Image: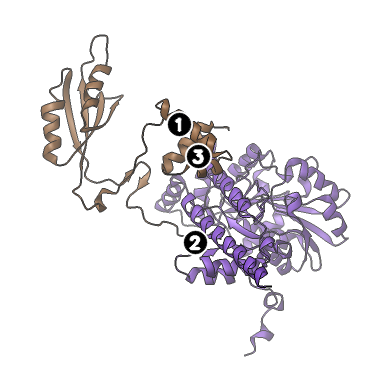
Chain colours: A brown, B purple
């Protein structure tokens, strides 16, 4: 099975976005120039949007962020379907992610806020009053056990002997 | 009590594994980075672990039939047929406690006192002791980096005597990472024409082949009758600790192996067998996606490590199998054991001296890439520092003279 050069690079960056082009080149039997060019292309074409982090918030010294998953039901709009409402929702900085869903509701909206009250206020004062939104259901995240394939807390999990035949 | 007089000289005269000695030092050392492990860094996929847990919950804590669960044996046969094109029936399949047990069984079933068994050198540390314990005489077939550590008919033929009972094929190879293609195997098989030599092929690393698909010896025309195929779940499914392997062979051979197995092991652990059923079932359902993922990951690390060693001046032939690279360290002027000791004490990196895998491994070190990239990058940084410092020292030395 041959995967494209781009898919290989994306796969490596998804595991560690700090992997340098030089290392990626060695992993893929390529050259640093070729990797840099491919990454630049993907950035330019908005395939690669941002390099980010996965943080264990329970261990940070600053106050934790509150996360909520909000189910949103809407009435799709004439000629624009779901896109116009989705666009409005997505523009709020509080909204971390917004997905159109199959099933009992239309959008899954992930919202971050400094306190419970901030998130509640966002839902009641901004989200639920949007034109076309018919109902919301808010679920607060109590604890993160796994995020983006990383099980928390992540310690050394190599249980192997130092040397084996 | 004079134990020396009591203990079996065949065992007491056997040198302990060269790896063990090294392990004891490295295990005690703090901040030591190891490239010495011969097992995957992946944990057994969750659905496989879950199947074992379920078997426990269901009270599956009994013996199974000596040869293993029929369902598992059928799946193993299907796996070998579909993946490698070798045909076996349930009666020709024996589930063992790791591939290691299967090797021991094969030797004990085949070898009479004084029989010779050809073994590629360098290779995995267990073959020679297994032959010796079975009363046989291990005969090393030297392989070299020049031809990718393959066994050739030219190297094998002169070593064949009337006492040659069997040959152990072990590709993809631990420690070299060498593989043998179908053409290589065909050429080698010519050496067995007109003989009754049995080929015991240990294919535990078969799924970890990075160039084409693994070629199985039993699939060659006319070779099935003389082939004992051995493999297991450890490497392909990251299941080393489960101790689950198998042997596939013509019934007359397998029946004898089964007898030894039934009197010594009884059966492989039942939970491991249920886990093995899940590994293969799920594998067929997903076209072995998990295995492919692991292989892809290993392949990237392999590329990285081969390049790194070559750029350090430790020439490294490209290994197309297993998860080892086997760079040559002769340019440092050290023996492989000296190299490993100095690297361990100087830079706290543990690698395995090639000499531990037989005399022809001397001048090489075995480095495993069953580690995360971060780990490999740090190890390479330390090794290249070590090489650079050695070069600097030897230049000083020249100046003094």
In this rendering, the answer to whether A122 lies above or below B160 is above
Question: Which disc is residue B282 wearing?
Answer: 3
Q: Which residue is mark 2?
A: B33
Question: Which disc is residue A40 wearing?
Answer: 1
- What residue is rendered at 77% in x and 52% in y? B151
Kind of element beneath mark 3: helix
Find the residue positioned furthest to the bottom: B1
Residue count near mark 1 (Cα–Cα under 10 Å), binned few <14, some 14–19, many ≥20:
some
Residue count near mark 3 (Cα–Cα under 10 Å), binned few <14, some 14–19, many ≥20:
some
Between the C-alphas of marks 3 and 1, the distance is 39 Å
Residue count near mark 2 (Cα–Cα under 10 Å), binned few <14, some 14–19, many ≥20:
many
Q: Measured from the top left, where is residue A48 in percent x and y?
A: 40, 31
Q: Who is closer to the viewer here, B205 or B155? A: B155
Q: Where, quadrant-wise, is the C terminus of chain B in this rendering?
A: bottom right
Q: Is residue A143 left or right of residue B162?
A: left
Q: Do tag 3 and tag 1 residues touch (Cβ < 8 Å)? A: no
Q: Measured from the top left, where is residue A105 in percent x and y?
A: 24, 24
Mark 3 or 2 closer to N-term? 2
Q: Who is closer to the viewer here, B56 or B46? A: B46
Kind of element beneath mark 1: helix
Q: Measured from the top left, where is residue B216 in percent x and y?
A: 70, 44
Kind of element beneath mark 2: strand
């Amino acid at each position: 099975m041959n995967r494209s050069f781009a898919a290989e690079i994306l796969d490596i960056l998804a595991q560690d976005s700090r992997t340098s082009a030089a290392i990626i080149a060695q992993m893929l039997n390529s050259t640093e120039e070729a990797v840099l060019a491919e990454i630049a292309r993907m950035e330019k074409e908005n395939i690669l949007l941002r390099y980010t982090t996965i943080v264990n918030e329970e261990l940070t010294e600053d106050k934790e962020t509150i996360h909520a998953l909000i189910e949103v039901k809407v009435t799709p709009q004439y000629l624009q379907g779901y896109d116009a409402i989705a666009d409005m929702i997505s523009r709020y900085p509080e909204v971390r992610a917004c997905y159109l869903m199959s099933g009992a509701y239309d959008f899954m909206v992930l919202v971050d806020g400094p306190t419970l009250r901030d998130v509640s206020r966002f839902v009641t004062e901004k989200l639920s009053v949007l034109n076309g939104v018919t109902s919301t259901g808010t679920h607060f995240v109590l604890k993160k056990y796994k995020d983006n394939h990383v099980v928390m807390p992540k310690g050394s999990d190599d249980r192997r002997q130092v040397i084996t035949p | 009590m004079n134990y020396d007089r009591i203990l079996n000289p065949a065992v007491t005269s056997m040198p302990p594994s060269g790896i063990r000695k090294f392990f004891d030092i490295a295990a005690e050392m703090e901040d030591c980075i190891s490239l010495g492990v011969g097992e995957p860094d992946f944990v057994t996929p969750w659905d496989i672990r879950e199947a074992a847990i379920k078997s426990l919950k269901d009270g599956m804590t009994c013996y199974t039939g000596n040869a293993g669960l029929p369902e598992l044996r059928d799946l193993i046969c299907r796996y070998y047929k579909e993946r490698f094109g070798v045909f076996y029936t349930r009666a020709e399949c024996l589930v063992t406690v790791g591939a290691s047990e299967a090797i021991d069984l094969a030797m004990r079933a085949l070898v009479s006192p004084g029989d010779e068994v050809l073994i590629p050198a360098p290779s995995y540390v267990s073959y020679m002791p297994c032959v010796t314990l079975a009363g046989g005489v291990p005969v090393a077939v030297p392989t070299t980096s020049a031809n990718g550590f393959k066994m050739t008919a030219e190297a094998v033929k002169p070593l064949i005597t009337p006492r040659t009972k069997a040959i152990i094929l072990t590709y993809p190879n631990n420690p070299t990472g060498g593989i043998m293609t179908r053409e290589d195997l065909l050429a080698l098989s010519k050496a067995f024409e007109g003989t009754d030599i049995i080929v015991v092929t240990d294919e535990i690393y078969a799924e970890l082949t990075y160039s084409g698909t693994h070629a199985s010896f039993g699939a060659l025309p006319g070779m099935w009758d003389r082939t004992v195929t051995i493999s297991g779940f450890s490497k392909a499914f990251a299941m080393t600790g489960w101790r689950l392997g198998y042997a596939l062979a013509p019934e007359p051979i397998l029946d004898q192996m089964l007898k030894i197995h039934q009197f010594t092991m009884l059966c492989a652990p039942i939970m491991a067998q249920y886990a093995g059923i899940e590994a293969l079932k799920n594998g067929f359902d997903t076209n072995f996606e998990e295995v492919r993922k692991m292989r892809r990951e290993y392949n990237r690390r392999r590329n990285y490590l081969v390049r790194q060693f070559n750029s350090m001046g430790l020439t490294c032939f490209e290994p197309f199998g297993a998860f080892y690279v086997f760079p040559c360290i002769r340019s440092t002027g050290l023996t492989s054991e000296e190299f490993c000791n100095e690297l361990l004490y100087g830079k706290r990196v543990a690698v395995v001296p090639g000499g531990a895998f037989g005399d022809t491994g001397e001048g090489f070190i075995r480095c495993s890439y069953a580690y995360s990239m971060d780990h490999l990058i740090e190890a390479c940084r330390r090794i290249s520092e070590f090489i650079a410092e050695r070069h600097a020292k030897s230049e000083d030395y020249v100046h003094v003279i």
